[in-house]
Structure formats: structure tokens, C-alpha cells
Amino acid sequence: MNTESDHHFRNVVLLWLLASVIATPIVVFVIGPGLPPGNGSAQAHGQVVDNTVLLALATPVALVVLVYFGYVMWAFRERDPDTVVDGPPIRGNSSVQFWWLTVTTVLVLFLAGYGTVRLLADGSGGGQGPNPIATPAAFKSSKALQVQVVAQQWQFTYRFPAYGGVETNAIELPENTPVVFNVTSLDVIHSFWAYELGVKADANPGENNVAYVMTRGPLTFHVRCAELCGVWHGYMFNRGQVVPHAQFAS
């Protein structure tokens, strides 16, 4: 690089560092806590953390592109419309290419490792079939509440094997309890989506899809079908509640 190129390169780097130092904490501490699906369960909170990590890592990468193009449009704008001079032909910059490949490779490998650790720690149940590859200890214990979610056109019903197989049209769960959902369908493909709990699992005919959730405090959550299942698909929703243990037992 010549002196002028070094000058522009330093300007871009300094502007990028300044923008990253300002924007990344805003993403983590201001935007992050408000990301979906909220903190209605341990799994939902984990998804908020994961979304925050992804957004925080993506922020400096996006700012590299935005700052670079913003600086180029400002520094190299046409100041004299009567003068047309082509810039020198550029075939590439090995240093920029090396660091771009290095940084992006490290980011991808880090995210692959991070995702694997999170998957194994929180359980892989999320519509993965009847035998998830990772099941946390809390969901293997006898204290885990088994709930069968039965989808059909156009409603969900819920069965509780530990309570004599009672079946309800509206789901109610006890607080601070590990819950194992066994999701299936009686007709076509549906999808059980308990938004605030951070749970989404396909309901396939003749299949049992396992999904895990660790409830927290009292909460009203929404259940929707997230798979186009027929003419009344849009009306296939209801509300559920997480309630104190005494209320659930009664």
C-alpha cells in the first residue's frame, strides 16, 4: 500500500472499531434481552441467549461492510464532474483476503462448537423423533411430567398419563418442572408451537416427536399450529398456563 492507501485503510479500521465498540454493547445489553421468544422457560431463555450471541457476532461483521461502503462513498465521491479519471486497476489484496478468510473461518468454527455444546447441554428434543441424541438428566427423572400432545384438524388436545390419561383442550403445566412433550397427529402434518415456552415440534401422523421444556414461574403462553394443515389452519390455536403446583394438582 502507498501512503494514501494506508491513510484510508487506517480510517476505515478506526471507524469500524468505533462503530463496533458502540453498537455491540447496545446489541448485547439493550436489544438482546428483548429478543424472542422471551424468558418463559429455561429453553426460551436459552434461545434468547443464543440469538443474542449470534447477533453480537454478526454486528461487527455487518459493520465492516457498512463502514467500508460508507467511507468509500464519502472519500472517493466525484468532486469535479468535469474530470473523469479511472483509478488504478486492482487485482486483489492478499492481506485482506487472508484476514477475511481467517476471521470468518474462526467465527464459523466457533459457532459450530457453541451450537453443539448448547444442543447437548439443553437436550436435542425439539421434534427430533422419539429418540433425541441428548437428554438432560432432569428430563430422565421420575419428576419429569409426561404430556402427550395430540394434533388433529383443527385443534390440539393434551393427555397426562400420570393422571389417569386425562385429556384436556387447554394445556396447564406446573411451575419449575421438567416437562417432556410427546407430539403426534391423528390426521395430517401439524406443528406444535408453544411460543413463550420456546417449544416447536412437528406433529406427524403415526410418529412421536419428543420436545423438552423446563417451566419457570406462572405464565400465560400461546399455542399455535406452525404447519399449513388445511382450510382452518389459521384458527388452530389456544392458550396455555404455567401455574403453581397446588393449583395444577387441584
Image (cartoon, rainbow, N blue to C red):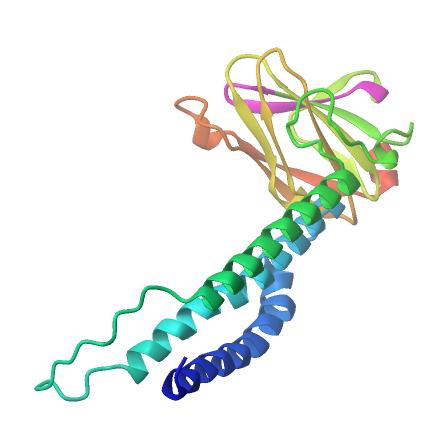
Residue found at x 64% / y 23%: 157
Vertical placement of 60 versus 78: above or below?
above
Q: Quadrant of the N terminus?
A: bottom left
Q: Is residue 226 magenta?
A: no
**Residue 96 at x, y percent in the picture:** 46, 67
Q: Quadrant of the C terminus?
A: top right
Q: Is residue 160 left or right of residue 191?
A: right
Residue found at x 40% / y 83%: 8
How would you classify the magenta stretch by its main secondary structure?
A: strand
Q: Residue furthest right?
A: 142
Query: Along the line of sight, which residue is nearer the eye, 237 or 137?
Result: 137
Residue found at x 64% / y 28%: 127
Q: Quadrant of residue 90?
A: bottom left
**Residue 76 at x, y percent in the picture:** 27, 81
Residue found at x 59% / y 22%: 203
Q: Residue furthest left?
A: 82
Residue range (magenta): 151-162
**Residue 71 at x, y percent in the picture:** 36, 79
Query: Can residue 23 be seen in the rendering of this structure?
Result: yes
Q: Is residue 157 magenta?
A: yes
